Image (cartoon, grey):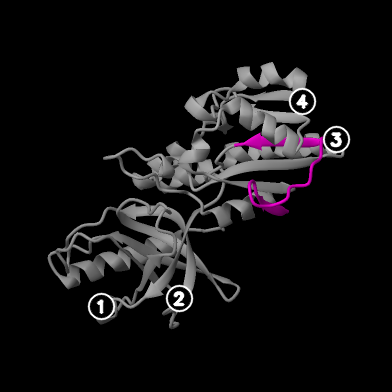
Amino acid sequence: MTVVNYVSDEIVFDKNTVLTVGTYDGVHCGHQGILKQMRALADANNGRVVVLTFHPHPQIVLQKEGREPVRLLTSIDERCEMLEAMGVDVTVIITFTREFAKTPAEVFVRDVADKIGVQQFFVGHDHMFGRDRGGNEELLQQLSTELEFEVKTLEPLQCDGEVVSSSKIRAALVAGDIESANAMLGRPYDLSGTVVQGDGRGRTIGFPTANIEPVNASKLVPGNGVYVVSYEFEGRVVKGLANIGHRPTFTTHKDITIEVHFLDLDEDLYDRTITIHFHAFVRNEKKFESAEALTEQIENDRQHAYELTVTH
């Protein structure tokens, strides 16, 4: 797959292009359905699949004062890797700025048709883009005859009969509903971070932990609680328990920490960048009356993790 910047890189023109525009955060199972349709159509006509995506996320750039910033399901690099795995030939990254947001939708569509080429334009039935969200199916239909492309309108994205969206997945993750989020993603949610020095308290009670600092500040961290996670270490999958929260048994600070206790791994992971995959919610974070009570609970959590079958 070729990755190019819409403004700064040269883009090879090819009229025989199946194209779509969108953020595609998460590349969830609904997105995957679109991409499979596009790939099949391109193959049938000996064409190519092109996805135009935005970075940074438009909601980050246009964030309103007082509103929480949107947290992403995928970094731009992760998104590109997933698009490549789905058979996309060219991913075009549009550097989203406030200036770009002022571009009229018609100007944008004409520029895309002239610069990239398009034979079939895939668009969601309710998807809107361009200044004042003026770009939609109606505008594309109006321009399709003149610019000689076909509009392919998509129904609401679904997985197993349920409507799916990136925002629904984010809400599920924040609520700790890992099972629903993973079902909509079509894979376990993952989070990459650097293992940093902690206070070593876990080791003193017999459960050493890796303290993880996310490498991407915009990546969504699931809601507070204990989760079964996994990590691929030197070709094998290692299970673990991730605690996300404030560690109320030992501290009173409000900073969120991510600590992972791996079940069958005794390695020095400091300064490594690792990726953990979330598989199941175990329990809410709570304050225990003593270190002994916490130890007993962790033993129960470990047993739960051992019994769970995980797949990446």
- Look at mark 2 in the image and give the residue it sits on: 264
- Look at mark 3 in the image and give the residue it sits on: 44
Give the mark nearer the N terminus: 1 vs 4: 4
Q: Are marks 1 and 2 in contact (CB under 8 Å)?
A: no
Per the image, label 1 sits on a secondary structure element best described as loop
Residue type, numbered disc 1:
Asp
Residue type, numbered disc 2:
Asp
Question: In front of the other: label 2 or label 4?
Answer: 4
Up the image or down, 161 lies above or below 43; here it is above
Residue range in magenta is 1-21
Name the residue rendered at 72%, 48% in the picture.
90
Q: CA distance from mark 4 to mark 3?
A: 16 Å
From the top left corner, tell me how far across and down residue 310 is, in percent: 52, 58
Question: In front of the other: label 4 or label 3?
Answer: 4
Q: Are marks 2 and 4 in contact (CB under 8 Å)?
A: no
State which quadrant residue 288 falls in: bottom left
Q: Are marks 2 and 3 in contact (CB under 8 Å)?
A: no
Is 99 in front, or is 173? 99
Q: CA distance from mark 2 to mark 4?
A: 56 Å
Residue type, numbered disc 4:
Phe
- Look at mark 4 in the image and give the residue it sits on: 149
- Look at mark 1 in the image and give the residue it sits on: 199
Task: Give neighbour class at mark 4: few <14, some 14-19, many 20+ (Cα, 10 Å).
Answer: many
Name the residue rendered at 66%, 22% in the picture.
140
Name the residue rendered at 66%, 42% in the picture.
51
